[in-house]
Image: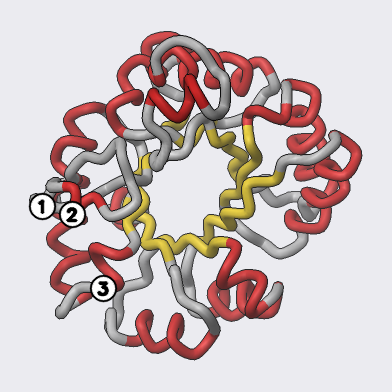
């Protein structure tokens, strides 16, 4: 069941080491899968990843690489050496860039160890169809765009994608159930505009489970809760059953 518990990833959206570690201390003996994004990684550097691994956490390093293939490949070789469990790129970087990212991870992974999971961002959960059509200039529906990116991601040999829970069924249908869907945009029961905050395509943990999401990523609903531990355990029960 411990592996199932690791299907709920807590986003450590903190400005530095001390508030992030204080939050983790508030969870007692729990050792959740955690996501380190740009803000925290840029503030603390690789040493913080080592600290998390020493504390027993799985780590999703969420840097969303998007650059020329050579740069992404070389960067992934470095990130593989940090011992993270999952990392990501932007699918918009093309099949060639994503394949280069995978090659870099393979080159940088210590012999005898599994390379980190590699997933690709399709469309951010803060993007709605109007913005996608009129600002990014991608035609069609969000689901169509996300599905197209998912197929390119699979072609590049990656393990899955970042998407909203509502797109998970379509992705599993076209890419198979072994192709991972990692889903942010998780909120609790308050899905009013205020409850969504800056997200657009959102679901509750129970809804994400029903839609077939493989992992959920939850930040502010846990880190900003009056009782983060109770909230985390409640979300985990909703998503993995206990």
Name the residue that disc number 1 marks: 190
What residue is drawn where x is 22% and y is 75%? 228
Please state which of residues 37 and 9 is positioned toward the viewer in this rendering.
37
Spatial CA span between label 2 and label 3: 12 Å
Please tell me the numbered disc located at residue 220.
Answer: none
Spatial CA span between label 3 and label 1: 14 Å
Please state which of residues 225 and 206 is positioned toward the viewer in this rendering.
225
Question: What is the crowding at mark 2: few (fewer than 14 residues within 10 Å), some, or many (at least 20)?
Answer: some
Task: Pick whichever of labels 2 and 3 is earlier in the sequence.
Answer: 2
Q: What x and y, as percent, mark residue 166?
A: 28, 27
What residue is drawn where x is 77% and y is 60%? 81
Task: Pick whichever of labels 3 and 1 is earlier in the sequence.
Answer: 1
Please tell me the numbered disc located at residue 224.
Answer: 3
Q: What x and y, as percent, mark residue 186?
A: 27, 48
152 left or right, relative to 15: right
Name the residue that disc number 2 marks: 195
Q: What x and y, as percent, mark residue 115?
A: 68, 45
Spatial CA span between label 1 and label 2: 5 Å
Q: Is residue 3 visible?
A: no
As helix, strand or loop, the secondary structure at mark 3 comes to loop
Please state which of residues 42 and 52 is positioned toward the viewer in this rendering.
42
**Looking at this rendering, what residue extends furthest in the front direction?**
134
Front label number (2 vs 3): 2
Asked if marks 1 and 2 touch (Cβ < 8 Å), the reply is yes
As helix, strand or loop, the secondary structure at mark 1 comes to loop
């Amino acid at each position: 069941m411990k592996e199932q518990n690791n299907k709920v990833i807590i986003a450590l959206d903190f400005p530095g080491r001390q508030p992030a570690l204080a939050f983790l201390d508030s969870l007692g003996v729990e050792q959740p899968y955690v996501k380190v994004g740009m803000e925290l990684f840029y503030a603390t550097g690789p040493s913080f990843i080592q600290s998390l691994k020493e504390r027993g956490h799985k780590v999703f390093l969420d840097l969303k690489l998007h650059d020329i293939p050579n740069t992404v490949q070389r960067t992934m070789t470095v990130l593989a050496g940090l011992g993270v469990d999952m990392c990501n790129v932007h699918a918009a970087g093309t099949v060639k860039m994503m394949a280069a990212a995978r090659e870099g991870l393979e080159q940088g992974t210590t012999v005898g160890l599994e390379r980190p999971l590699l997933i690709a961002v399709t469309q951010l959960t803060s993007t709605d169809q109007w913005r996608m059509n009129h600002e990014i200039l991608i035609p069609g529906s969000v689901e169509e765009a996300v599905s197209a990116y998912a197929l390119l991601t699979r072609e590049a040999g990656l393990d899955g994608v970042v998407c909203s829970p509502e797109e998970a069924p379509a992705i599993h249908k076209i890419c198979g159930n072994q192709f991972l869907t990692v889903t942010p945009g998780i909120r609790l029961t308050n899905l009013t505009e205020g409850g969504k905050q800056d997200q657009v395509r959102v679901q509750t943990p129970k809804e994400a489970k029903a839609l077939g999401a493989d992992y959920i990523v939850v930040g502010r609903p846990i880190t900003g809760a009056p009782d983060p531990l109770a909230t985390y355990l409640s979300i985990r029960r909703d998503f993995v059953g206990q």
